[in-house]
Image (cartoon, rainbow, N blue to C red):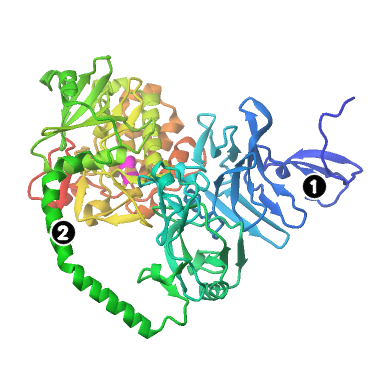
C-alpha cells in the first residue's frame, strides 16, 4: 500500500478521527482528547487556493508559519500554480500577491478598518473584516454578518484574488468583488515617490516636491525608476508635508507603536533623520498608534475616496503653506521675513507681465478653444461625418428611433453591415452640449455587459454625435408599459432584467474605475438586446465622486419625476442611495407593468410605491403582480423581488440597502428586514413636488427635467 498524502504533524494520537465542521474546516482530532478544539491537523492551516470565512491569512512570528493562498496551475489542474497571496515576511500587516518571487499586487497596511489599498473592503452590511495582532501571530480574517451567507476567497490560476457569494436561486457562485481593480494596483507601477491616479492620463505622476528620475523614460510611459527629490534633505532643515487620499507605501522598512498618538509619532520621526514618513497606525476614532517609514517610499496610489493621510519628510522649501509641520529650529522669523520680501518683490516685478500674457492667452484661447476642447481627452474612435450620414440615410425619418433632451436618436448601418445607434445633438440644446461631454467622459471609461457600449463619436462642422451599439428591442418602457408588447416579457425575462440592471448599477457604484452616480435611471434608459438582456444607457446626467465624497448637493436638480429620491428632488442631495431608490421604482414597475408616475387605483390615491407597500403590509404582495405573467411566475421570487424593491424606495437613504446588498438579497434565501414607508407615498406627493418647482406641468412621457433653484 502506497501513501498518497500525510500531514506534517509530529503529534501522536491514540484514536484519531477526521471531522468536517460546519465552518468547512476539515480537522483531525484525538477522540480521547477532552478538548474538542485541540486539533492534530486542520485544513484551515493549508487553504490551497480557497480561504473560507473564519480561516486565517497571516503569519506566526515565532514559528514563521504562514497561512496563505496558492493558486492552481489551471482551472482543471489543482497542482500548485505560480501565484501566492500572503502576508509579507517583514513589515506591518499587508497582503502581497506574488507570481513566483515577483510582487504583482500589495494591499497596503491594515488601518484598523481595512487594508489601506483596498477601499472596497470597507465595513458593510454583509461582511466584517478583522486583524488579530498578538505577540506571537498576526492574521487577517473575514466573516459574513449573516451565517446563512456562503462565501469564499479564491486565488485564480491567472492571479486574481476574488470573493464569491453563493446564490441559492441560481445554484452558482456570484462574484462579489475582485481585489485588484485597475492598472494602479500593479505593484510599484510609478516607482519610488511616484503616485498612480487611475482618473488621470497618464496615470503616473511624482509627488509634490519630486521629479522624474529619468524624464526621457517617463516620456515613453516607463515610470519604473520613479522620482527623486527636487531638493535634498539635510535633516535640520526638513519638514513634513501632509498628503491625503493615498494608499500607504510598502511597510517593508517600517516601525510601529500601538500606544502613541499622532503628535508623539511626529516627534519620533522628527528626531530620526532616516525617518521618511509617518501616520496613524489605526484610523478609527480620530486615529491612534504610530507607523514610521525608513528609506524610499514605493507603491503609492491616489483614491478618489477612502484614501489615507500620510506625512512625508520634505525640504522646507518644497512645502505648501498649509498642511505641513516644520522641523528646523533655525528657520527663524528673520529668515521668514527675508523670504516674504523676496516673494513680494518677485510678484510685483512680474505682475504686469503675467497680466499681459493672460490677456493674450485669453484672446487666443477663445479663437482656438471650441474645436480643440470638444475633441481632447475623449479616448474614443472618431467617426467621419459622411460615414454617419451615409449609415443613417441622411438621418431619415424612417431611421429615427426616438428623441430626448439631448436630441434625436437614429438607427444606422455601416458598410460592413454593423448596426449602430446615433445620438445627434440638437443644435438648439445648450443642456445637450453639457450632457454630450459628460456622457463621453463617463461611459468611455466604463465596460460592463449591462451597460450600453459606446463605439465612438463624431465632432465635425456643427455636428456632435455619439455612436452606440444598436439595441434591437429598443427600451424597457417600449415593452413594459404596453398592454400588448409586455406579454412578451414573462416572469423569467422580467426577473433576469431586474438582476441585470442591478449588476450594472453595482458596477457603476463599486467596481468601475470611477464611482458613478447615474442620476437618471428610468425605464426609457434601460435598453434591451436581442435576448432582452438589459443595458443601462444615457449617462448625460451622471456624476462621479472624488476625494472622500459619499454624497453631494447641487442647485441644479436633474432627473425624472417618479424616479427621483426624496432627498434629491427636494433638497438636491444625491448619492449612490439615490440610484438605489430609482432602481427600487424600476423593480416595482417591472413587476406590476405599471408606471409609478400617473398610477391610479379606484380604492385610494396612492402612487405605485404606496400601493405596493400597502399590499405588502397587508400580506397581499402578489396582488401587485402583472396579471399577464401569472402563469410563468416562481412564487417566492416574486414576493422576494417586491420586498427588495420596497427596501430600495424607503424614505431615508440610510435605510436603503447598497446595490451589493440588493443583488445578494434578490438571489438569496435569508430573512429580509421589514420595509419602512416609501418616499413619495402618494400621487399627491409627486404632484405637489412638481408644482413647487415649476408653474408648468411636466409631461408624462418621462422627459428628463432640470430645475434651477435657490438653496
The quadrant holding residue 437 is: top left
Q: Earlier in the sequence, mark 2 or mark 1?
A: 1
Residues 618 and 540: in front is 540
Q: In this view, does 228 lie above or below 49?
A: below
Q: Position of residue 698 (x, y in %)?
A: 12, 42
What's the magenta region?
A: 579-584
Mark 2 or 1, which is nearer the eye?
2
The rendered magenta stretch, by its main secondary structure, is classed as: helix
* Residue drawn where x is 13% and y is 22% of the image: 395
239 to 149, vertically: above or below:
below
Q: Is mark 1 on a helix, strand or loop?
A: loop
Q: Name the residue under label 1.
A: 39
Q: Which residue is drawn at 34% across and 41% down?
A: 584
Residue 153 on the magenta segment: no
Instruction: Please give the name of the residue rendered at 55% of the width and 52% of the height, measured from the top-left corner.
Output: 128
What whole-number distance in Å separates the C-alpha atoms at marks 2 and 1? 78 Å
* Observer able to see residue 124: no
Front residue of 654/294: it is: 294
Image quadrant occupied by the C terminus: bottom left
Q: Which residue is drawn at 86% across and 44% down?
A: 31
Contact, CB < 8 Å: mark 2 with mark 1?
no
Q: Which disc number belongs to residue 357?
A: 2
Above or below residue 521? Residue 297 is below
Amino acid at each position: 500500500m502506497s501513501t498518497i498524502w500525510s500531514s506534517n504533524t509530529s503529534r501522536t494520537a491514540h484514536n484519531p478521527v477526521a471531522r468536517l465542521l460546519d465552518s468547512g474546516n476539515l480537522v483531525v482530532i484525538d477522540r480521547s482528547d477532552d478538548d474538542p478544539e485541540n486539533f492534530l491537523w486542520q485544513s484551515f492551516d493549508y487553504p490551497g487556493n480557497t480561504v473560507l470565512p473564519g480561516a486565517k491569512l497571516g503569519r506566526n512570528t515565532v514559528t514563521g508559519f504562514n497561512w496563505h493562498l496558492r493558486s492552481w496551475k489551471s482551472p482543471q489542474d489543482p497542482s500548485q500554480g505560480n501565484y501566492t497571496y500572503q502576508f509579507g515576511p517583514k513589515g506591518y500587516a499587508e497582503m502581497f500577491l506574488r507570481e513566483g518571487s515577483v510582487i504583482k499586487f500589495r494591499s497596503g497596511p491594515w488601518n484598523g478598518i481595512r487594508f489601506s489599498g483596498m477601499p472596497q473592503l470597507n465595513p458593510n452590511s454583509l461582511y466584517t473584516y478583522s486583524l488579530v495582532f498578538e505577540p506571537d501571530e498576526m492574521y487577517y480574517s473575514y466573516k459574513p454578518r449573516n451565517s446563512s451567507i456562503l462565501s469564499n476567497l479564491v486565488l485564480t490560476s491567472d492571479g486574481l484574488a476574488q470573493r464569491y457569494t453563493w446564490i441559492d436561486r441560481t445554484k452558482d457562485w456570484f462574484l462579489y468583488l475582485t481585489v485588484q481593480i485597475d492598472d494602479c494596483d500593479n505593484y510599484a507601477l510609478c516607482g519610488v515617490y511616484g503616485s498612480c491616479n487611475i482618473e488621470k492620463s497618464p496615470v503616473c505622476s511624482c509627488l509634490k516636491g519630486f521629479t522624474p528620475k529619468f524624464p526621457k523614460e517617463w516620456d515613453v510611459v516607463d515610470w519604473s525608476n520613479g522620482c527623486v527629490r527636487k531638493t535634498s534633505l539635510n535633516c535640520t532643515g526638513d519638514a513634513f508635508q501632509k498628503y491625503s487620499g493615498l494608499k500607504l507605501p510598502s511597510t517593508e522598512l517600517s516601525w510601529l507603536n500601538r500606544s502613541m498618538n499622532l503628535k508623539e509619532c511626529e516627534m519620533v520621526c522628527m528626531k530620526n533623520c532616516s525617518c521618511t514618513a509617518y501616520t496613524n497606525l489605526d484610523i478609527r476614532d480620530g486615529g491612534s498608534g504610530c507607523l514610521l517609514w525608513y528609506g524610499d517610499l514605493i507603491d503609492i496610489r491616489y483614491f478618489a475616496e477612502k484614501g489615507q493621510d500620510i506625512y512625508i519628510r520634505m525640504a522646507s522649501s518644497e512645502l505648501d503653506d498649509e498642511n505641513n509641520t516644520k522641523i528646523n529650529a533655525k528657520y527663524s522669523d528673520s529668515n521668514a521675513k527675508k523670504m516674504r520680501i523676496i516673494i513680494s518683490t518677485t510678484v510685483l516685478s512680474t505682475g504686469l507681465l503675467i497680466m499681459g500674457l493672460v490677456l493674450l492667452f485669453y484672446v487666443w484661447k477663445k479663437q482656438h478653444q471650441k474645436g480643440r476642447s470638444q475633441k481632447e481627452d475623449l479616448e474614443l474612435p472618431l467617426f467621419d461625418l459622411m460615414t454617419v450620414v451615409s449609415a443613417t440615410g441622411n438621418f431619415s425619418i424612417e431611421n429615427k428611433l426616438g428623441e430626448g433632451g439631448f436630441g434625436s436618436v437614429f438607427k444606422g448601418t455601416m458598410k460592413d453591415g454593423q448596426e449602430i445607434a446615433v445620438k445627434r445633438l440638437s443644435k438648439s440644446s445648450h443642456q445637450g452640449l453639457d450632457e454630450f461631454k459628460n456622457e463621453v467622459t463617463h461611459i468611455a471609461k466604463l465596460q460592463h455587459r449591462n451597460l450600453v457600449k459606446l463605439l465612438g463619436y463624431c465632432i465635425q462642422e456643427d455636428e456632435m454625435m455619439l455612436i452606440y451599439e444598436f439595441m434591437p428591442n429598443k427600451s424597457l418602457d417600449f415593452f413594459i408599459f404596453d398592454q400588448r408588447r409586455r406579454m412578451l416579457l414573462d416572469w423569467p425575462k422580467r426577473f433576469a432584467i431586474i438582476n441585470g440592471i442591478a449588476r450594472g448599477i453595482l458596477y457603476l457604484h463599486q467596481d468601475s474605475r470611477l464611482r458613478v452616480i447615474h442620476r437618471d435611471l428610468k425605464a426609457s434608459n434601460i435598453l434591451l438586446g436581442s435576448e432582452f438582456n438589459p443595458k443601462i444607457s444615457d449617462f448625460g446626467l451622471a456624476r462621479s465622486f472624488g476625494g472622500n465624497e459619499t454624497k453631494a448637493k447641487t442647485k441644479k436638480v436633474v432627473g425624472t419625476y417618479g424616479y427621483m429620491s426624496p432627498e434629491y428632488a427636494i433638497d438636491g442631495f444625491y448619492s449612490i442611495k439615490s440610484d438605489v431608490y430609482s432602481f427600487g421604482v424600476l423593480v416595482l414597475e417591472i413587476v406590476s407593468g405599471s408606471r409609478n408616475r400617473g398610477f391610479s387605483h379606484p380604492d385610494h390615491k396612492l402612487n405605485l410605491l404606496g400601493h405596493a407597500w400597502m399590499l405588502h403590509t397587508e400580506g397581499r404582495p402578489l396582488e401587485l403582480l402583472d396579471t399577464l405573467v401569472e402563469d410563468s411566475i416562481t412564487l417566492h421570487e416574486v414576493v422576494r423581488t417586491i420586498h427588495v424593491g420596497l427596501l430600495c424606495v424607503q424614505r431615508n437613504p440610510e435605510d436603503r440597502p447598497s446595490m451589493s446588498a440588493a443583488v445578494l438579497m434578490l438571489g438569496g434565501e435569508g430573512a429580509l428586514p421589514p420595509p419602512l414607508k416609501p418616499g413619495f407615498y402618494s400621487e399627491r406627493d409627486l404632484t405637489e413636488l412638481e408644482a413647487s418647482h415649476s408653474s408648468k406641468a411636466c409631461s408624462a412621457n418621462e422627459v428628463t427635467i432640470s430645475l434651477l433653484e435657490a438653496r
